[in-house]
Image (spheres, rainbow, N blue to C red):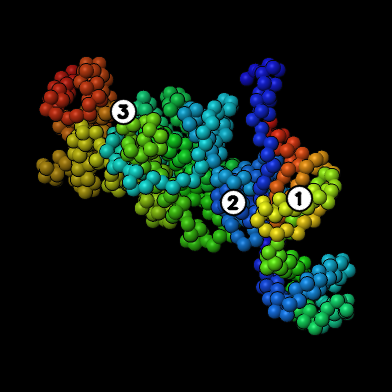
């Protein structure tokens, strides 16, 4: 995984720079997401991984699938990836691109798992507190997770704030061993 | 250990009372690959170099490589249950081990867990395994001796408190034997001993423990064992663990002696870890920092002054210096001291005791090569009487070595040369000493005095050891007061000189050897 990131980084950095120049980060983001989901498709990945498939045919196929979702710059990028045999990097490129975008716009993606659904006011309050704790603006995705039993689990990148009953029980289990 | 139910519930209650319920914030990562005890973890962006990382199943690892997208971690202990995708947590702590008086008499592994079946270790204090050595201001020069109890070493290659003296030699030359004798001889001196066994057979470690117990030397000794069957990571950190345990005593104004047996195997373990971490190999496939591996370890063996001890103990211990003496062991291959690791360690230490297999095989045990062995700082620390009497020994042996080749033409040689050869043969014989029979300062003084004053010259070469044994017995029974006096003061003056002379002369008159 780390090796893939090293390979994907120059592509992601180049795409992001170009997107910033033309002011089309949102469009690029959508386009990369689409291409990545295409690559993840099982039938397509068989074709991509097959060394016998000729590069021209492969790029024609990819362009055909992506028709309507890509502009001329996106097309060139896709052709470049096919030429360099790096189509399988697309999901990693997408992830890095999103990370660059988030850093540039000054927010962090935060996943919040709760045992019980938030009310709107609490969600707002919680978001403000979390922004203060992390010192950054946040994009919050809330998900319900009954296995937590109670409380909240917050994931912001590598950082985890565990305030769930499940986490405390695990902690206690260790302490009592 | 027997516990009744109410005690158990009390224990649990106490644990629950002290239980910290605040929300836990930490950094997480996921395992990407597991290869021979080396785990690559994605994430963990806030991990520190050397930080303890928590894996599932109460397993810990140490972060060694911090890279752009991943962290290279060595697992400390078994790693078979770790799989790709496991969650890894930062603990925010550099690897620590328990330290304290409670460890004395115990056998522990490289993480400080007891492995001798004598129950938990009753100490709350811990210390990080990697510490920076005391600074220049904190140090004091070496001027007190550590008596190893071996005539040949204490007379010719003295070791001082806070010194680093390398024991180097091929396999089967008695390196460990010297170390064990040194530990046994510290009984009653207040010097605490730590024996770090790295990459040895478990049976050898058990033997060492048994021998130390037999001679009542376990009470002042800690054994840190990372046997050959334990992972390379544990073998690599074991010396640092032992060093931290020794520093505990040093920093409290006491004296400690640590033996690393042996650093060659530690370098091998570190080479394995480094290559698996994909660090570039250098000479003999060792990584680039193999010199620093040993220099940072041995630099921690030092003598610190009273002011530093006072500072470290918060004013509780005043006017006492602390020391940690190190006896690292290096095993050479075919007597080659110019290999990579031996040259490194020779240049780091304050001298070396060089053991040779041909000496060992010809019955000279300890097989110390007096010409190649040196002690760069020990002279200043030597007991007065041994320094005075031992000086002649070195000279006698050096002159003998030059002339030894002519020994077979004894009849054609001039008087003085023949005398030197004969003196050399007797001194060589006298330097032999049995294992597990360390000698006190007074005993050594008597033997050395007898050689210096020429009392041995009339004794046949093959009778020298018998003569010595009988002399020691005689001195013990007839001149105990003189012996005690020497042991207590360590001085050498006319009174003692004439006392020894008189005693030995009266012994010779008994003809009892």
* A172 vs A61, nearest the viewer: A172
Residue B9 percent across, percent down from the top left: 70, 21
- Say which of marks 1 and 3 sits in front: 1
Mark 3 in CB contact with mark 2 (< 8 angstroms) = no
Which of disc 2 and disc 3 is earlier in sequence? 2
Q: Are marks 1 and 2 in contact (CB under 8 Å)?
A: no
Q: Chain of mark 3?
A: B
Say what secondary structure mark 2 lies in.
strand
- The 10 Å Cα crowd at callout 2, few under 14, some 14 to 19, many 20 or more, is many
Q: Nearer the observer, disc 1 or disc 2? A: 1
SS category of the residue bearing label 3: loop
How far is the residue under mark 1 from the one under mark 3?
78 Å
Label 1 is found on which chain of the structure? A
Q: Locate residue B11: give its quadrant.
A: top right
Q: Residue at x 11, y 42 (%)?
A: B416
Residue B298 rendering spot, x and y as whole percentages = 41, 46
Give the image location of residue B33, x and y in percent: 69, 55
Report whether B35 appears left or right of B464. right
Residue that label 3 marks: B439
B348, B88: nearer the viewer? B88
Give the residue at x 49% y 46%. Answer: B130
**Residue B380 visible in the picture:** yes
């Amino acid at each position: 995984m780390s090796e893939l990131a090293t390979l994907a980084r120059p592509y992601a950095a180049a795409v992001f720079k170009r997107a910033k120049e033309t002011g089309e980060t949102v469009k690029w983001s959508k386009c990369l997401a689409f291409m990545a989901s295409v690559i993840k498709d099982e039938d397509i990945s068989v074709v991509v991984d097959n060394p016998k498939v000729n590069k021209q045919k492969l790029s024609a196929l990819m362009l055909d699938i992506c028709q309507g979702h890509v502009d001329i710059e996106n097309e060139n990028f896709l052709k470049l990836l096919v030429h360099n045999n790096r189509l399988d990097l697309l999901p990693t490129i997408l992830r890095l691109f999103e990370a660059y975008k988030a850093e540039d716009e000054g927010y962090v993606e935060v996943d919040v798992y709760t045992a019980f659904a938030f009310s709107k006011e609490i969600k707002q309050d919680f978001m403000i507190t979390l922004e203060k704790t992390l010192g950054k603006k946040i994009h919050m995705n809330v998900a319900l997770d009954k296995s937590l039993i109670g409380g909240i689990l917050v994931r912001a990148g590598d950082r985890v704030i565990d305030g769930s009953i499940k986490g405390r029980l695990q902690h206690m289990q260790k302490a009592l061993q | 250990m027997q516990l009744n139910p109410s005690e158990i519930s009390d224990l649990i209650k106490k644990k629950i009372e002290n239980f910290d319920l605040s929300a836990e914030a930490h950094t997480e990562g996921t395992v990407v690959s597991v290869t021979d005890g080396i785990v690559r973890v994605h994430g963990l962006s806030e991990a520190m170099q050397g930080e303890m990382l928590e894996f599932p199943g109460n397993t810990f690892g140490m972060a060694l490589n911090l890279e752009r997208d991943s962290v290279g971690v060595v697992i400390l202990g078994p790693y078979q249950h770790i799989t790709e995708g496991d969650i890894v947590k930062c603990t925010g702590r550099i690897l620590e081990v328990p330290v304290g008086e409670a460890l004395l008499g115990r056998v522990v592994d490289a993480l400080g867990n007891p492995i001798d079946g004598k129950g938990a270790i009753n100490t709350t204090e811990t210390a990080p395994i990697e510490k920076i050595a005391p600074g220049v201001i904190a140090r004091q020069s070496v001027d007190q001796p550590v008596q190893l109890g071996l005539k040949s070493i204490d007379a010719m290659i003295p070791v001082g408190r806070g010194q680093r003296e390398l024991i180097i030699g091929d396999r089967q030359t008695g390196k460990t034997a010297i170390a064990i004798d040194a530990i046994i001889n510290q009984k009653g001196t207040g010097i605490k001993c730590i024996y770090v066994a790295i990459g040895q057979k478990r049976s050898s470690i058990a033997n060492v423990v048994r021998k130390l117990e037999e001679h009542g030397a376990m009470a002042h000794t800690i054994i840190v064992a990372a046997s050959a069957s334990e992972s390379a990571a544990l073998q690599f950190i074991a010396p640092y663990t032992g060093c931290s345990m020794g520093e505990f005593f040093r920093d409290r104004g006491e004296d400690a002696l640590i033996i690393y047996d042996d650093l060659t195997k530690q370098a091998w373990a570190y080479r394995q870890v480094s290559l698996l971490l994909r660090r570039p190999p250098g000479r003999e496939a060792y990584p680039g920092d193999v010199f620093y591996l040993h220099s940072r370890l041995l630099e921690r063996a030092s003598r610190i002054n009273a002011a530093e001890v006072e500072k470290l103990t918060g004013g509780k211990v005043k006017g006492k210096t602390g020391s940690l003496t190190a006896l690292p062991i290096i095993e050479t291959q075919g007597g080659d001291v110019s290999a990579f690791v031996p040259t490194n360690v020779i240049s780091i230490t304050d001298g070396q005791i060089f053991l040779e297999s041909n000496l060992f095989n010809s019955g000279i045990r300890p097989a110390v090569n007096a010409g190649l062995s040196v002690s760069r700082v020990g002279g200043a620390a030597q007991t007065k009487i041994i320094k005075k009497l031992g000086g002649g020994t070195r000279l006698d042996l050096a002159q003998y070595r030059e002339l030894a080749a002519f020994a077979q033409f004894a009849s054609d040689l001039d008087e003085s040369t023949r005398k030197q050869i004969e003196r050399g043969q007797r001194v060589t014989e006298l330097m032999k000493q049995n294992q597990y029979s360390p000698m006190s300062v007074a005993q050594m003084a008597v033997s050395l005095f007898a050689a210096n004053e020429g009392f041995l010259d009339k004794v046949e070469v093959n009778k020298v050891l018998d003569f010595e044994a009988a002399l020691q017995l005689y001195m013990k029974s007839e001149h105990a007061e003189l012996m005690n006096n020497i042991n207590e003061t360590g001085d050498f003056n006319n009174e003692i000189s004439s006392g020894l002379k008189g005693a030995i002369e009266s012994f010779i008159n008994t003809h009892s050897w």
